[in-house]
Image: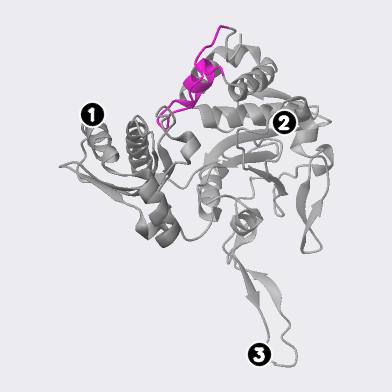
Amino acid sequence: MKIFDNKIRTDKDPAKHIDNTYDFFDRSDSKKADVIRVVINEWFDNYPETDKAEFKKRFKKEFSSSLYELFIHELFTKQGFCLESHPLLENSSKRPDFLAKGNGIEFFIEVKEATDKTDEERALENKTNLIYDIINKTISPNFYLNIKSLSFKTEKQPSAKKVVRYLENELPKNNPDLTQVNLEQYGYTGIPNIHFEDNDLSLVLSLIPKPKEKRGKGKARPIGIYPFEGFIGGADDSIRSALEKKANRYGVLEKPFLICINSTSFRGTDNYDVMDSLFGSSSISYSTNPNNRDERLDRAMNGFFRNNSGPKYTKVSAIMINRLILGHIKEGKYWFVKHPFAQNDLDFDKFEFDKILVENNKIMTKQGKTVNEILKLDRFDLNF
């Protein structure tokens, strides 16, 4: 059984905003899709045979979370562990994702995604993506479209025909050569805007003239610039929240427990987010003595591992946090962190990749292999 069956594929169009990710990769004839299919099918070959049929069904509907589960399975398999799916527990009717055995140790693995978006925000995102796909159907031979603002006035889905018809009626009224002159002279304030509004949708976009050699080619997607989404803060809250939901799920465990989190935050995920979520928010403290400021990094007592009352979630032995992005798996960042107060210690010497742990009250990093090296990803052209 394969995730992606061998068949003739002829669709060369790029993915739509509203596309189901599995459906796109399953139909696309692009080089990118072909490489992704090869990698995923190879990983799936190593997945437990008895669980393949159920996993494939889930993969088709939940591409991102299922891909991460498959990635984690492959990552630990390649380090000499055999992973059993959904093992029985002594003290709980619930089952973790895997029991890993190998290199002289055994431990449980739970896999989860961490996202910033609520169900309502995801529904709005899907609705917005559908509008983007509608606008991208517009024939615009002379202009790229800069979407300056987009807002929904009702719960109804706006009429696709009405939006496209209006844009295609308004676009020919504008001269790309004159617009280019105004753009060069006055900047973006000198280019024309198109306003669309009905009972369901309010849309404002500006027209950016295409280079002369690209004009008259109306098949290219017209949207050139999307609205900028600002935010404050990072991914630490979503990471911490995801960990807390899994930390006590299985009661008392007789073996070490590893939680793996794929942070898909639209804010991005970096070392500050991970360290703040686990060890507490960072801040700079310093002395009021002008002759000796004694600046140093302090951490608040609000991390996953500890608060003002002491150690927390000690049933968890370690955390792995990834930022897994298709096409950038080779360069994907990860953090493998030991819980400094764990009830069941996980022997970090049994793992090949970089490790973060506390020694002598200091957070230390021990260098190891990269994910790229462990999974031998240089065999694949994954730089898209």
Classify 235 as above or below 298. above
Identify which amino acid the numbered label 1 is placed on: Lys
Q: How many marks?
A: 3
Identify which amino acid the numbered label 2 is placed on: Leu
Q: Residue at left 64%, top 12%?
A: 49
Q: Which residue is mark 3?
A: 288
Magenta stretch prevailing secondary structure: loop
Mark 1 nearby-residue class (10 Å; few <14, some 14–19, many ≥20): few
Classify 217 as above or below 305. above
Which label belongs to residue 161?
Answer: 1
- Label whose residue precedes the other's in the sequence (2 or 3): 2
CB contact under 8 Å: marks 2 and 3: no
Q: Secondary structure at mark 3?
A: loop
- Label whose residue precedes the other's in the sequence (1 or 2): 2
Q: Residue at left 41%, top 50%?
A: 180
Residue 330 inside the magenta-drawn segment: no
Residue farthest left in this picture: 199
Identify which amino acid the numbered label 3 is placed on: Thr
Mark 3 nearby-residue class (10 Å; few <14, some 14–19, many ≥20): few
Which label belongs to residue 75?
Answer: 2
Residue 181: horizontal and vertical position, in percent? Answer: 41, 54
What range is drawn magenta here?
7-29
Q: For residue 132, which quarter of the picture?
A: top left
Nearest the eye: 137 or 27: 137
> CA–CA distance between discs 1 and 2?
47 Å
Q: Is residue 230 visible?
A: no
Residue 27 inside the magenta-drawn segment: yes
Residue 28: horizontal and vertical position, in percent? Answer: 53, 18
- Label whose residue precedes the other's in the sequence (3 or 1): 1
Q: For residue 284, which quarter of the picture?
A: bottom right
